[in-house]
Amino acid sequence: MPGPDNEIVGKGTWMDKIADSIISRERNLGRPLGLIKVESGLGASGIPHIGSMADAVRSYGISLALRNLGYESELITYSDDMDGLRKIPGGFPAWLKDYIARPVSTIPDPRGTCHRSYGDHMTDSLLSGLDAIGVKYIFQSATDAYRRGAFIDQIDKILKRSRLLGQKIVKLVGQEKFIETLPYFPICESCGRLYVARAEKYHDETKSVSYSCIGSKIGKGFIPGCGHTGEADIVKGQGKLAWKVEFAARWVALDIRFEAFGKDIMDSVRVNDWVSNEILSYPHPFHVKYELFLDRTGKKISKSTGNVITPQNWLRYGTPESLMLLFFRRIVGTRVIGLQEIPLLMNEYDMYEDIYFGKISERNSAKRMKINGIYEYVNHLKPPKFPEDHISFEFLVQQGSLFPLEEREEKVFQRLARYHMVRKKTDGLVRKISLASNWIEDKITNGNQLLDISLSANEKNALSELIDTLRSYIGSEGGQNTPLLIQTKLFEIARNNGVQPKDFFRLIYKLILRTDRGPRLGNYVVDLGIQRTREILTEHLRHK
């Protein structure tokens, strides 16, 4: 049983608290705890993105926490590839307009012939992202489930009580649609479309639904029907349940005990919970509501509009650990997300690792336990035995930008070794240099982007003096004592201008390297080039 609110459960993370609540609830319900399944729905009608992935990865985190508490658990990823295409996602071919309202599993691959269908292409994009970060799951295709009759019992019970269900939906969410029609979408055998055929009557003796293809409003437009009338066999998967009831059917059929949801489908979850409890006699899964990801303009990330960051986009620049950390840090609160978050999360992961291995002290025991727990979950409960040498992503980008692509990896490593920042060329270091190199090739433009940093009068005076002092060292870069002399001057200039040396060094690191720390500054100024250092500092000072 869960203890008081302030009691630490498991590893002290939000995932542990939810896992503990699931176990407590399942015990109270008297259900067996041999295998606890958690689920994540995968949308297959639009571009898979970070928001879609978050649902699956967070559910995977709950599964990890359940395992940590001693229970066998698995994640079911359910692809809704029976869904009909409602609109053409941004950047996709215009010929898809001919397939509006058709199940995405019946639409050709819009990107060539790499997959059997549109639905397979979209689903595989997300699954490959999960594979790339090490998430383990059991995949379930909606098309396959319907065709093999996985939901026959649930569909039968729902359609037999459709009148009661329609009335309840009106009470719960105010939607009157299912007073007039069954909560089932037949696939018209004539035109092959969903949504346009109105389900009129259920024949329980033949397990079929009679329908008329009369057309329907989809999005902002109306899709005309073909006029065909017929019957759809629920046993053969010739249609699908409406969202208002389908979640419940699969929860029961797959024995799902946990599923999170975004606030955009709260009404559907409310109805499905009632259907699961009252019509299907299965206590609905434990839920957690999460906020949605927003883009940099504050708009909701949407797979249909195309303003998305795909897992593949992220992993071109960021480590799998940085992406896992994005999802595991917290579940509540709206999140603005962009590729600009990658350097911050990579550096934050390094901090978590340093705390985990005791290289950074964290006095707050609860916070330390939470950070250590998240670190272990990010590493799939198999943390490394030793920490990596940590170099900030910004520093790797700055260093890598000094060298051509073909020489970049070796040259950057040589610099890091000379600065005594790394001990050896590990796989992790090579991976980070490669990711930074991708960032350089795709993101870095000519010129030095200025940082929005407030400078005190003393700091401005110190920088101005440093710029003047460095002029006298131009041409002496090859001198053995030049780095030491510059290092000494940095201390003197700071003190002469009433600035703490450590604060002055941190400021210069920020302006030159986009980080709070780095190699010995005297050596780095010589390596970067004394004149180049003066130019960067002058440019920043000019704009303050």
Image (cartoon, rainbow, N blue to C red):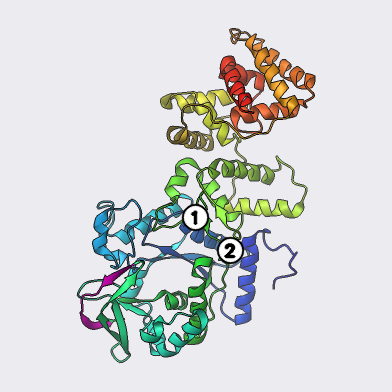
Mark closest to the chain's N terminus, 2 or 1: 2
| Residue 140: x %, y % from top left | 39, 67
Lateral position of residue 215 relative to residue 314, left or right: left
Asked which secondary structure carries label 2, the reply is helix
Write down the residue under mark 1: 299
Residue 380 appearing in the image: no
Write down the residue under mark 2: 67
Asked which secondary structure carries label 1, the reply is loop
| Residue 181: x %, y % from top left | 35, 84
Q: Which residues are magenta?
A: 221-232
Q: Residue at x 37, y 86 (%)?
A: 180
Location of residue 347 with respect to 166 vertically, above or below: above
Viewer-proximal residue among 532 and 381:
532
| Residue 270: x %, y % from top left | 52, 77
Location of residue 287 with respect to 402 vertically, above or below: below
Lateral position of residue 250 relative to residue 11, left or right: left
Q: Is residue 382 magenta?
A: no
Q: Residue at x 65, y 42 (%)?
A: 351
- Give amino acid for label 1: Lys
Location of residue 226 with respect to 98 vertically, above or below: below
- Give amino acid for label 2: Arg
Q: Is residue 223 magenta?
A: yes
**What is the spatial separation of the Cα atoms under label 2 and label 1, in whole angstroms?**
36 Å
Location of residue 114 with respect to 415 vertically, above or below: below
Viewer-proximal residue among 521 and 494:
494
In terms of secondary structure, what is the magenta stretch mainly?
A: strand
Quarter occupied by the C terminus: top right
Q: Are marks 2 and 1 in contact (CB under 8 Å)?
A: no
Q: Quadrant of residue 513?
A: top right
Mark 2: few, some, or many residues within 10 Å (few <14, many ≥20)? Answer: some
